[in-house]
Image (spheres, grey):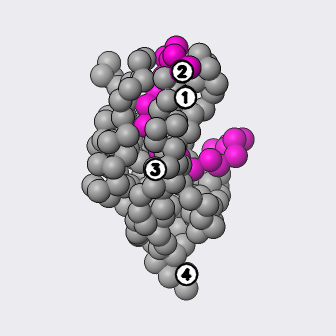
Amino acid sequence: MLRLFVALDLTAEIRQRLAGLGGGVPGARWTEPSNLHLTLRFIGEVPDDQAMDIDAALAELRAPAFSLTFDGVGVFGTGRRARVLWAGVERNEALAHLQAKVESAVVRCGLPAEERKFSPHITLARLKDPPADRIGRFLSDRGLFRAGPMAVEHVTLYRSHLGNGGAVYEALREYPLGSVE
């Protein structure tokens, strides 16, 4: 069994800018800069043969390359139930189109459709019982964050290895984007 997800890689410059947002929130487990990415579709545990089908479906993906701008920060959850700090992405039709194509490819391989609406973001930290005032300060102090544009020229299939120190992500294959023919 392989635990998989499809994501966009980030440039070293964008990773550095995002990592610079960290700190100041007790109870936050900050994402390692090397693990920062934008998830297009979490797949989860699949058998090897289904992983090969997903690889083949993603290899057939046709979508144009585009640029992405990162914009603002936010939180999933509220008050003491806040669970994730994230960096946002400026509205981008090319990103939405690409994500829909990835979703369609994964569903064709026999996985159920994702029920949640796609909300593009980069997870900065996972939270456990954070002080609400510190979350508010984090959002206020970093709310004007902007980075990019960043060229998006490929999609990556990742394997996630879970361990005591957190997940380690292994890039399995990159699928280039280009002009739709």
Q: Quadrant where the C terminus lies?
A: bottom right
Residue at the disc numbered 3: 145
Of 97 and 173, the residue lying toward us: 97
**Was residue 123 drawn as part of the magenta stretch in this picture?**
yes
Point out the stretch of residues depicted in magenta: 110-133
Badge 3 marks a residue whose secondary structure is loop
Q: Is residue 3 above or below residue 66?
A: above
Earlier sequence position, callout 4 versus callout 2: 2
**Was residue 115 drawn as part of the magenta stretch in this picture?**
yes
Q: Residue 136's mark?
A: 1
Could you tell me how far apart the alpha carbons at marks 4 and 3 are, in whole angstroms? 32 Å
> Which of the two marks, 1 or 4, is nearer to us in this view?
1
> What amino acid is found at the position of numbered circle 1 in the picture?
Gly
Earlier sequence position, callout 4 versus callout 3: 3
Residue at the disc numbered 2: 133
> What amino acid is found at the position of numbered circle 4 in the picture?
Val
